Amino acid sequence: DGGGDEEGGKVVGELAPGEIAVLLSMCWVMAWSGLAPRVSGGEEGGKGEPVLLPDVSHLVLSALVSAGAVADDDGVWGWEVSSAGKGVSVQEFTSWVISTVPGLGNCLSRYVQDRFRSSEADPAKESSVSTGNTTFDTSDAYLLTRGRAWSISLSVRNTLSEKFLSASVIGMDTEDLLYRSSLHGKGLSRFWSCVEGYKGPALILISAFSKAGSDNVDAGRKWGLGVLTEDGFENKDTFYGSSGFLCATYPIFRMLLPSGMTFVGYVLCHI
């Protein structure tokens, strides 16, 4: 709708929560179509990987909170995509995309480029994607679900974006898992023994529950946050890393970018 003279050339209207979820899922499917590995052999000609849509509710809720459609804590914790609620204007949604998930604007152009490359490729010479001995998990059994991996890939503007995009399509590469408290044990010393000497990019995810009252834990108020740094871990008594990304992963998604200040970083210490 072009609107009146003041709205000439602008797209106006409102997106309901369900419509935002569908739009985000469509964008993910466009990314999936270019990255999902083709399985050769087995049946005649092979079959493509099934489309398993990731959970994007944390992104939908993030857009609603940004626009003020969900303004109180109770609304955040009890919110569901299927529940009817106030939507957001197109302008508010666009502002949220630019500030939170700027990579979303590249989904269509990337899809078109992938289609062109696919049409120009020689089917006889085109090889299927090989995962070798790598084990992938698309069951969302880890804190880095496919939906959260996609969210991070849309937020960061560096080489890590492709890594997280791949994880959102074919699942997390289990060989990339350095530490998991349920597997390696809780405690900073056990964490350090698993990551000490690692010098590549690292994503640290933490999940917990809020307390309801003085002692009780409210299982319905689960939250998650993460830290993403491109520097590895060094064996020093005190190590100040370079600035990184701080993000909320659940129940809403929000990414805080590095400030660019020289002495801002994270402290890792031995205990």
Image: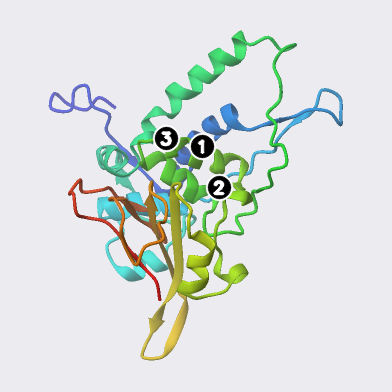
**Tally of numbered discs:** 3
Looking at the rendered image, the disc whose residue lies closer to the viewer, 2 or 3, is 3
Residue type at mark 1? Trp
Residue 166: x %, y % from top left: 55, 38
Residue type at mark 2? Pro
Is residue 221 among what the camera can see?
no
Location of mark 1 (residue) = 28
User: Which residue is rendered at x = 46% and y = 53% of the image?
Assistant: 57
Q: Is residue 203 above or below residue 22?
A: below
Q: How many angstroms separate mark 2 from mark 3 (CA)?
A: 22 Å
Q: Is residue 268 above or below residue 119?
A: below
Location of mark 2 (residue) = 54
Quadrant of the image containing the C terminus = bottom left
User: Which residue is rendered at x = 44% and y = 53% of the image?
Assistant: 203
Closer-to-camera residue (220/4): 220
Closer-to-camera residue (250/268): 268
Do the residues under discs 1 and 2 have CB atoms within 8 angstroms?
yes
Location of mark 3 (residue) = 159
Asked whether, in this view, residue 16 is left or right of residue 99, the answer is: right
